[in-house]
Amino acid sequence: MVARSLLTVEDLGAAGALRILDLADHMAEVNRRPNPKVPALRGKTVCSVFFEDSTRTRLSFETAAKRLSADTMTFAVSQSSLNKGESLRDTIETIAAMGVDAFVVRHRSSGAPQLIAGWTQASVINAGDGWHSHPTQGLLDAYTIRTALGRTGGLDGLRMAIVGDVKHSRVARSTVAIMRMLGAHVTVVAPRTLLPPDTGDAFADEVTDRLDDVIADVDVLYLLRMQQERMSEALVPNLREYTARFGLTPARAARLGQQTLVMHPGPMNRGVEIAVDPGELSGSVITQQVTNGIAVRMAVLFDLLGSGSPAAATTDDIREGLTA
Amino acid sequence: MSLLISGARVIDRNGERRVDVRVNEGLVDEVGTTLDPREGDQVIAADGLVLSPGFVDLHVHLREPGREEAETIETGSRAAALGGFTAVVAMPNTDPTQDCVEVVDFVARQGERAGLCDVRPSGSITVGRAGTQLAPFAELAAAGVRIFTDDGNGVQDPLLMRRALEYADGLGITLAQHCEVERLTAGAVMHEGSCCSRLGLPGWPSIAEELMLHRDIELVRLTGVGMHFLHLSTAGSVELVRRAKADGLPVTAEATPHHFSLDDERLASYDALYKVNPPLRTVDDIAAIRAGLADGTIDAIATDHAPHVPELKEQPLDEAPPGMLGLETALGVSLAHLDMPLAAVIAALSWKPAAIAGIDDRHGRPIDPGEPANLTVFDPDVEWEVVPARLASKSRNTPYIGVGLRGRVRHTILDGTLVVTDGAATR
């Protein structure tokens, strides 16, 4: 049987996303223990295959796997045979032959995890592919919002603005999709040059290039990373102008609602998308995003690799698996 | 030995009739309502089948010299013959490039050695297809080259394109453009639209094709020198060519079977099998291509047959090369997807491209006594599916596996010799 995979948040659907978020609550409880380690995935092997550098995401996944007692392997491309001309498929099949239960894949090409899932019996977890998808980021963002607001269930009626380079952002694609799936209203804020060519209703609830029109009315302000190389592609004139139009400046921070959450997927460009000290923003949950990333990735790994039929696992089953 | 093809519906540029046709010594020998077999005649019972002039493909990549692991002139010629083609124009993006007499002579000679199809090498417009220096048009024309193109790349420089047209004037050759403004397609892997937005893939906008097409139509107007436009893929392109023709400009155009049968949603699989250049477009573009073929705006169906080894296609979309097979499925896809009279489909596969290729002295001829016997016999109604292992092409990158096709070639006759009989190559 081909194992289940997590390639996009859309694959999960709203029910699947809620299942992971609820599971993440249990994982967060594990993480608060003095010894945050449980035997749930003992005997399972999780291999991180990162074809693009991302120390943060890789460490987050590996920490999550270790806390569930899975064995972890890392395939670092810089030391790999891909540099010796071995194909992606051969590389995956070779590692799979060593007995791997899940691949955690980061790749600079959109769709690479989907291709890999077609070549292996193991589960494939997309840890970010090209501009396409970063489902665990979307999940941890939704989880962070839900936790910060003390909500259970979905996010009906919540208003979010996501600001910046949506076009090149897998984070934006996943976070917008999951937020809308859970009932939130999402406004995308960007100049046309940083939007995908088609932003119809299927993409977002609203699209605007005027941050000032929406900033006072949102429950969540999500800022995306602005990359320096976008300047040379004539997408924005310069960072100063970008910050003036789309950055969280002191003047804009003053207009944020008292309870408005401020989020960023990291790494932050201080002085560009956030031109204030995030430590001084009462609603900043940027650090919590990182912390919650572990619990959410534990939930994903448990959901895919846990014993029995994880999707149908009862709370008791989960508790049993999480007993130290 | 002579051949007697009996009982077929004969369709050529003069219309349709029900006649028997005898072929002898490379020529159509005799045409009549009922011909009796002569001693030694090989009789092909073709009741219910169509006999037409052989097909002509303006656009194939035979990969030799340079990429023989993907296709050779022999395997590509066999695929062509099985697809009913008696002539193909071999694109110049070989290694080395078909930009000098030595290389085009080699390609033509390999075609003759294979003896399955009339292989007509094209020449590149610029040396090495690098877009800077004109290839020696006159030398190559003297060696028999009639079509010049930098296919795979468009000629970006408008000055060079203008000079190429002016220099070509009077040489009896045709320049063919791959329309793509490369500054607008950097990194692109699929059509720019809602699908690429969703899939997070860099888009290839329609305007990149239409801008160059518009520029070159205006260069044709300026110079008065004709041009052929390769693989139109957008509704806007069809309209530009339609208007240019209405203005009386000497332009012709082709479209591929994949651009009138497959849309950009196929890329949701992230399978590089569906990566082509220009990319698969939207259902609206497909409708416009079909309408353009139906009203004659688009003259020819050309395959852009582009074999690739599996290792190259089993890669993420941005790393895989563009292109798919086309020769063995062209008729089946055309008859399955085009709502046109059969004679119009055959025209777009045979005599119209033959004229564009400058080989209408040998191909696409009327089926009359004394004419060269380059002929195809096909079943226009049979439904079939591609069996990958049975493809004659050395590569397997066809998107039509498991897809119902309609119409299949039974016999192909090249210079009076059966090169395909009962759907199998004879050599």
Image: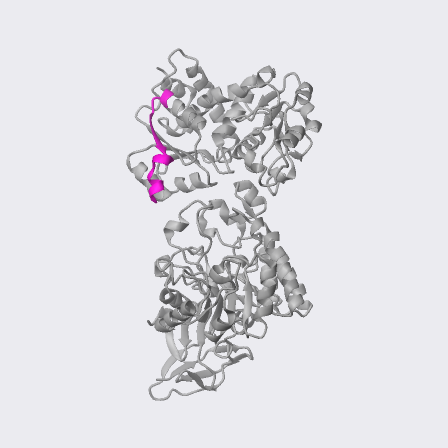
A272 and A306: which one is in front? A272
Residue farthest to the front? B133
Instruction: Give me the residue at 47% from left, 29% from top.
Output: A136
Q: Looking at the picture, how far across and down is residue A265, in whole percent? A: 53, 27
Q: Looking at the picture, how far across and down is residue B41, in whole percent? A: 36, 85
Q: Is residue B285 magenta?
A: no
Instruction: Give me the residue at 70% from left, 27% from top.
Output: A212
A315 and B167: which one is in front? B167
Residue farthest to the right? A213
Rendered view: A94 above or below B50: above
Residue farthest to the top? A34
Residue B288's quadrant in the figure?
A: bottom right
Rendered view: A260 above or below B49: above
Residue A254's quadrant in the figure?
A: top right
Instruction: Give me the residue at 52% from left, 43% from top.
Output: B201
Q: Looking at the picture, how far across and down is residue A206, in whole percent? A: 66, 34
Residue A243's quadrant in the figure?
A: top right
Q: Which residues are magenta?
A: A66-85
Rendered view: A105 above or below B105: above
Q: Quadrant of the N terminus of chain A?
A: top left
Residue B254 visible here: no
A70 and B179: which one is in front? B179
Left or right of residue B63: residue B352:
right
